[in-house]
Amino acid sequence: MLAGKKSRFVGSAVSSTGASRMATAKSRALRPSDQQQVRRIVAYVPTDLWRAFKLRCVAEDRTMSDVVTETVGAWLKKRT
């Protein structure tokens, strides 16, 4: 996308690199405090699945990290 264009997904300005300024600022705000140790997980999923996941999280006012944490926890609990 071009600089100054609106993202059709989050309604914020998008830089020339395609990164949403709003998403960048929001991700900084959502990082856990220094008291909580966390690790980043990188997962590659089909675009349609990512889009549906993102939209559902927004609709339910939840972070993607919260849902992934909950889901991985439940997955591990079933296997122990």
Image (cartoon, rainbow, N blue to C red):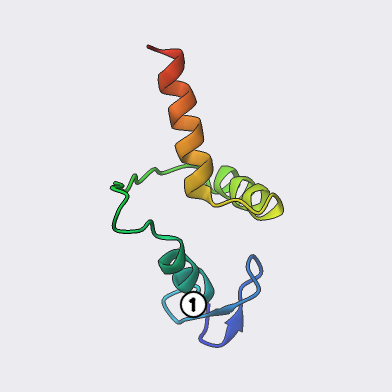
Q: Residue furthest front?
A: 35
Count the numbered circles shown.
1
Q: Nearer the viewer, residue 56 or 5?
A: 56
Residue under the image location 47 percent in, 81 percent down: 15
Q: Is residue 22 positioned above or below 35 on the image?
A: below
> Identity of the amino acid at label 1?
Arg
Q: Residue furthest top?
A: 80
Residue under the image location 58 percent in, 42 percent down: 49
Mark 1, residue position: 21
Quarter that holds the C terminus: top left
Left/right placement of residue 73 relative to residue 40 reads: right
Left/right placement of residue 48 relative to residue 45 reads: right
Q: Nearer the viewer, residue 37 or 41?
A: 37
Mark 1 element type: helix
Asked whether the viewer can see residue 1, the reply is yes
Residue under the image location 44 percent in, 28 percent down: 73
Q: Residue furthest bottom?
A: 4
Q: Position of residue 31 (x, y in %)?
A: 39, 60
Q: Nearer the viewer, residue 33 or 67?
A: 33
Q: Nearer the viewer, residue 4 or 60?
A: 60
Q: Is residue 38 positioned above or below 15 on the image?
A: above
Left/right placement of residue 77 relative to residue 33 reads: right
Q: Position of residue 32 (x, y in %)?
A: 38, 56
Q: Is residue 20 positioned above or below 61 on the image?
A: below
Asked whether the viewer can see residue 19, the reply is no
The crowd level at tag 1 (other Cα within 10 Å; few <14, some 14-19, many 20+) is few
Q: Position of residue 48 (x, y in %)?
A: 60, 46
Residue under the image location 59 percent in, 52 percent down: 54
Q: Quadrant of residue 13?
A: bottom right
